[in-house]
């Protein structure tokens, strides 16, 4: 998950000054997704929220499997 994290584009509107972020997908940590051509594109960044959700799901699943395995060994 850390080698191929989720990324998102950041778009800043010059008219209102507001920013919009939307998911791009997964890409290798050293080579982020390409910048979008044209428009008001500002950059890309790692989608920390989605990455944390993935860590939580994997952590909870691992704990459940460990507990199930311990009960079956008793």
Image (cartoon, rainbow, N blue to C red):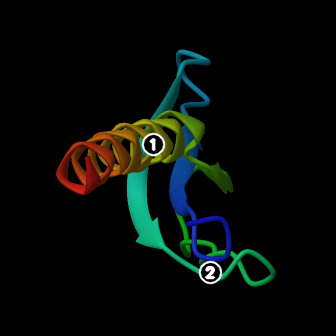
The residue closer to the viewer here, 24 or 13, is: 24
Q: Is residue 19 left or right of residue 25?
A: right
**From what the image shows, is residue 43 above or below residue 71?**
below
Name the secondary structure under disc 2.
loop
* Horizontal and vertical percent position of residue 32: 69, 75
Q: In percent of the image, x 18 and y 53: which residue is there?
A: 72
Look at the image and tell me in which quarter the N terminus lies: bottom right
In the orientation shown, which residue stands out farthest toward the front? 74
Estimate how packed mark 1 is, as few (under 14), some (14 to 19) or many (20 or more) residues with alpha carbons within 10 Å.
few
Q: What residue does disc 2 label?
A: 34
Sequence-first disc among 2 and 1: 2
User: In what element is the residue under mark 1?
Assistant: helix
Residue 42, image x, y percentages: 69, 50
Residue 48 at x, y percent in the picture: 59, 39
Q: Nearer the viewer, mark 2 or mark 1?
A: 1
Instruction: Name the residue located 61 percent from the left edge and 30 percent from the top edge.
Output: 14
Residue drawn at 37 percent across, 49 percent down: 66
Pointer 1 residue: 59
Whole-number angstrom distance, CA of label 2 to CA of label 1: 31 Å
Q: Is residue 65 left or right of residue 37?
A: left
Q: Quadrant of residue 60?
A: top left
Q: How many residues crowd around disc 2 within 10 Å: few (fewer than 14), some, or many (20 or more)?
A: few
> Looking at the image, which is closer to me, 48 or 54?
54
Q: Is residue 43 above or below residue 67?
A: below
Report the side of 44 relative to 27 (left or right).
Answer: right
Residue 74 lies, with reference to residue 30, above or below; the image says above
């Amino acid at each position: 998950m850390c080698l191929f994290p989720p990324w998102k584009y950041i778009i800043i509107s010059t008219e209102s000054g507001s920013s919009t972020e939307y998911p791009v997908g997964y890409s290798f940590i050293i080579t982020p997704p390409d910048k979008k051509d044209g428009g008001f594109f500002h950059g890309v960044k790692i989608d920390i929220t989605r990455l944390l959700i993935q860590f939580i799901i994997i952590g909870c699943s691992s704990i459940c499997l460990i507990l199930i395995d311990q009960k079956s060994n008793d």
